[in-house]
Image (cartoon, rainbow, N blue to C red):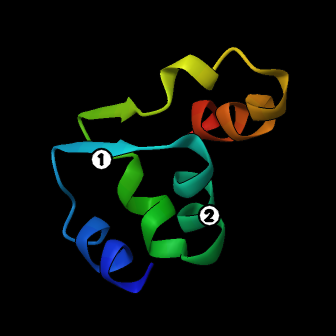
Amino acid sequence: MLKQSLELQRVPHIVVATPGRLVDHIQKDYKVREMISRVRYVVMDEVDRLLDESMKDDIDTVNFL
């Protein structure tokens, strides 16, 4: 988690993440929340589960940004 957070702080152009992991980073580190607004592309992994109701809150959190 720490290594991923440090990589996200470098403001990559593309982020590939599961919605849950991305939300974890956003909630735990204010710098990641600030950085995510400058990323060009966010690719959501686990696309087969994105339609599952249990992932709705995570997707809504990511979409809010």
Dot 1 or dot 2, earlier in sequence: 2
Which residue bears the numbered disc 2? 24
Residue 64 image offset from top left, x and y in percent: 64, 35
Q: In the image, what residue occupies the spot 45% across and 78% down?
A: 1
Q: Check residue 38 in the rendering and tell me which mark sits there, or answer none.
A: 1
In the rendered structure, which amino acid carries the disc numbered 1? Arg
Query: Element at badge 2?
Result: helix
Q: Splitting the image into 4 quarters, where does residue 48 fall?
A: top right
Q: Is residue 57 left or right of residue 61?
A: right
Pick the quarter of the image with the C terminus. top right
Q: In this orientation, which residue lies closer to the viewer: 54 or 8?
A: 54
Q: In the image, what residue occupies the spot 29% across and 47% down?
A: 38
Indicate whether 4 appears above or below 56: below
Q: Residues within 10 Å of mark 2 (few under 14, many from 20)?
A: few
Q: In the image, what residue occupies the spot 57% across and 62% down?
A: 26
Q: Splitting the image into 4 quarters, where does residue 39 fall?
A: top left
For marks 1 and 2, give the CA distance: 18 Å
Q: In this orientation, which residue lies closer to the viewer: 1 or 33?
A: 1
Q: In the image, what residue occupies the spot 29% across and 80% down?
A: 6
In the rendered structure, which amino acid carries the disc numbered 2? Asp
